[in-house]
Image (cartoon, rainbow, N blue to C red):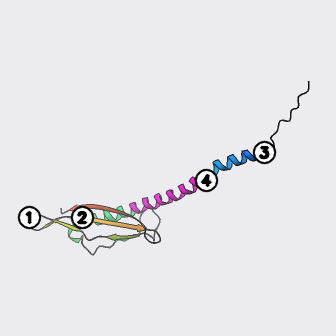
């Protein structure tokens, strides 16, 4: 008895395999594209946090009496390991004072906000308190 051994794929089987593969791969490619945006946003946010923390530390190291409404945020980080990011903008809110019974300022709240993006739609805010030494 002779068996007919045409061990191959028919055109319909190949088309079905390609269709199933395409249906499975399209969402995977969509997730990959979306994850690139999420990673880019997380990277920008992390750099903003680092820059804001550097500015916060600079202000905390100032003399207590010099921490006032005239402080400006300088996002020039040429002395750090980060690249320059000119699209980051920083704001410093006027410090909130806490007074003792004699009316002397003994503590200040410092709030720094860094924004980025075309319309500054993204931002991070750091807040701390500084006590008089």
Taking depth in this image into account, of 9 and 116 the one nearest to the observer is 9
Residue 81 shows in the view:
no
What's the magenta bit mostly, secondary-structure-wise? helix
Specify the segment rendered in magenta: 27-50
Residue 70 position in % (x across, y down):
27, 75
Q: Specify which label sits upstream in the sequence, 3 or 2.
A: 3
Q: Which residue is mark 4?
A: 29
Q: Secondary structure at mark 2?
A: strand
Residue 104 location, quadrant: bottom left
On residue 101, the disc is 1
- Residue neighbourhood size for the residue with mark 1, other residues' Cα within 10 Å, grouped as few (<14), some (14–19), many (≥20): few
Contact (Cβ within 8 Å) of mark 1 with mark 4? no
Q: Which residue is mark 3?
A: 12
The residue depicted at 60 percent of the width and 51 percent of the height is 27
Determine whether, in the image, residue 67 is placed left or right of residue 81.
left
Q: Specify which label sits upstream in the sequence, 1 or 2.
A: 1
Q: Which residue is mark 2?
A: 109
Q: Spatial distance from mark 4 to mark 2, Cα to Cα?
A: 47 Å
- Residue neighbourhood size for the residue with mark 4, other residues' Cα within 10 Å, grouped as few (<14), some (14–19), many (≥20): few
Determine whether, in the image, residue 88 is placed left or right of residue 8.
left
């Amino acid at each position: 008895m002779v068996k007919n051994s045409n061990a191959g794929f028919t055109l319909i089987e190949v088309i079905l395999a390609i269709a199933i593969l395409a249906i499975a791969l399209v969402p995977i490619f969509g997730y990959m594209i979306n994850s690139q945006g999420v990673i880019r946003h997380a990277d920008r946010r992390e750099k903003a946090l680092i820059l804001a923390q550097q500015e916060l530390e600079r202000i905390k190291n100032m003399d207590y009496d010099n921490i006032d409404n005239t402080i400006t945020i300088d996002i020039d980080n040429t002395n750090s390991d980060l690249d320059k990011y000119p699209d980051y903008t920083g704001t410093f809110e006027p410090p909130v004072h806490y007074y003792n019974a004699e009316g002397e300022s003994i503590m200040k709240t410092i709030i720094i906000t860094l924004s980025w993006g075309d319309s500054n739609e993204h931002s991070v805010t750091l807040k701390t308190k500084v006590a008089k030494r």
